[in-house]
Image (spheres, grey):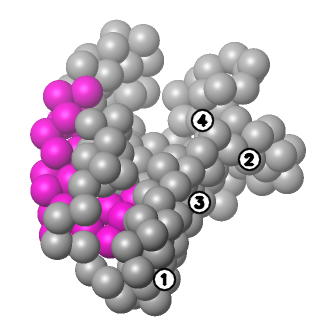
Amino acid sequence: MVPMMLLAALCTTAETENDLLAFGCGGLVFALGVFLRIWAQMHLHYRLKIRKTLTVTGPYALVRNPIYLGNTLILAGACMLAELFWLVPIQIAYCAVVYTFTVRYEEDHLTEKYGDAYKEYVSLVPRWFPKGTAGLSVAEGSFGRYLSASLLAEAHLLLLLVPFVVKELGIAWISHLHT
């Protein structure tokens, strides 16, 4: 995520000067990405000190890689917040390439770790685009039990907003100096 975040934070070329559009759409897409990561965390328990099992509930009942989809939404939202709507399709293509290689590696590892259970999961649940729940439970899981821990584990994502706030304030300050 770092190269695209840096580009969005530092680039001022062809910015959309419609703040309502940039901050409204960008904030919504960014928030959807954060929500998806939190929801995934509540089921995956990645950063939590819990024994890992094959996760097939929550967003994992819809797609096999909700964290990466969340990251893609976060980056798309960041590009919009940076007023760089032209960068969104480039960023999505970047994520598609990077995450395709990452997922192929991870799927080999998960097949070794979980065997036939993972192979069955792969046959039921699409990698990227939801087709339904395939008999798995979207609602199953301990919503309340892991909510606060998942929020805490994903709170660092809010720091991703800092460069865009600084960029906007810096540009406003520079504009003010020139008037």
Numbered circle sitting on residue 24: 1
Numbered circle sitting on residue 44: 4
Residue 141 relative to residue 66: left or right: right
Numbered circle sitting on residue 35: 3
Check disc 2 and give the amino acid type: Leu
Check disc 1 and give the amino acid type: Gly
The residue drawn where x is 42% and y is 65% is 174
> Can you give x and y, in whole percent of width and height, for residue 153 in the image?
70, 36
The residue drawn where x is 26% and y is 31% is 103
State how far apart marks 3 and 2 are (Cα). 9 Å
Going from N to C along the chain, the mark reached first, 3 or 2, is: 3
SS at mark 3?
A: helix
Q: Closest to the observer: 104 or 38?
A: 38
State how far apart marks 1 and 3 are (Cα). 16 Å
Residue 27 drawn above or below residue 163: below
> Can you give x and y, in whole percent of width and height, for residue 70 in the image?
44, 52
* Quadrant position of the N terminus in the picture: top left
Residue mark closest to the camera, 4 vs 2 = 2
SS at mark 1?
A: helix
Q: Closest to the observer: 165 or 37?
A: 165
